């Protein structure tokens, strides 16, 4: 029995070919390109949200719900890429066209509602991120 197992292991080891160090399923250049694109998109999203947080109506909305814009601004980088991108899209809409940003296809909402929601979303997501960091540490 031992001899059969030893022969089986020897055959298995003889058939194994070492993998070449430069062979990958995805070429390193493509990986680097995708990482660069993701990094650039995140930087643009951060810039867009920061620009929206600088708007006077967002500052007023933050005060109305009892938040400090600087605290919210510090929490934004803790969002994951998908959350940050969603927030950046809404922030860009608010920055470029406050009327369109505060309307849906069905009904118009007050102009202060979207900034209040943006600030609240940032605060909630930032609080969740802080809680996770606290739990992990």
Image (cartoon, grey):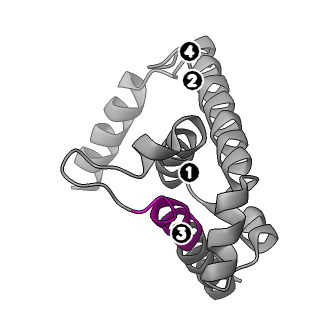
Pointer 1 or 3: first along the chain? 1
Residue, disc 3: 116
Name the residue carrying label 4. Answer: 30
Q: Nearer the viewer, residue 63 or 70?
A: 63
Q: Position of residue 118 (x, y in %)?
A: 53, 62
**Camera-nearest label, 4 or 3:** 3
Q: For the residues carrying marks 1 and 2, which lies nearer the camera in this image?
A: 1
Quadrant in the rendering for residue 69: bottom right
On the rendered structure, is 94 left or right of 67?
A: left
Magenta portion: prevailing SS class = helix
Q: Which residue is mark 1?
A: 84
Q: Earlier in the sequence, mark 1 or mark 2?
A: 2
Q: Which residue is mark 2?
A: 34
Mark 4 / mark 3, whichever is N-terminal:
4
Q: Position of residue 67 (x, y in %)?
A: 69, 80
Q: Nearer the viewer, mark 2 or mark 4?
A: 2
**Secondary structure found at label 2:** helix
- Distance from disc 3 to disc 2, alpha carbons, whole Å, reads 34 Å
Q: Secondary structure at mark 4?
A: helix
- The span from disc 4 to disc 1 (Cα, nearest Å) is 24 Å
Q: Front-most of 69 and 18?
A: 69
Please state, as top left, top right, bottom left or bottom right, where the N terminus lies in the image: bottom left
Q: What residue lies at 71% left-to-right and 83% top-to-bottom? A: 137
Q: CA distance from mark 2 to mark 4?
A: 6 Å
Vertical side of 64 occupied by 88: above or below: above
| In contact (CB < 8 Å): disc 2 and disc 4 | yes
User: What residue range appears in magenta?
Assistant: 110-120
């Amino acid at each position: 029995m031992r001899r059969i197992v030893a022969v089986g292991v020897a055959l298995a080891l003889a058939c194994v070919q070492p993998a070449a160090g430069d062979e990958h399923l995805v070429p390193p250049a493509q990986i680097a390109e995708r990482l660069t694109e993701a990094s650039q998109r995140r930087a643009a999203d951060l810039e867009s949200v920061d620009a929206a947080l600088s708007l006077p109506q967002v500052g007023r909305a933050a005060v109305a719900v009892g938040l400090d814009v600087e605290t919210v601004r510090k929490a934004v980088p803790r969002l994951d890429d998908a959350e940050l991108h969603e927030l950046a899209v809404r922030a860009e809409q608010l920055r470029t066209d406050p009327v369109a940003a505060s309307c849906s296809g069905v009904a118009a909402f007050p102009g202060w509602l979207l900034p209040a929601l943006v600030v609240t979303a940032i605060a909630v997501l930032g609080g969740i991120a802080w809680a996770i960091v606290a739990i992990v540490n």
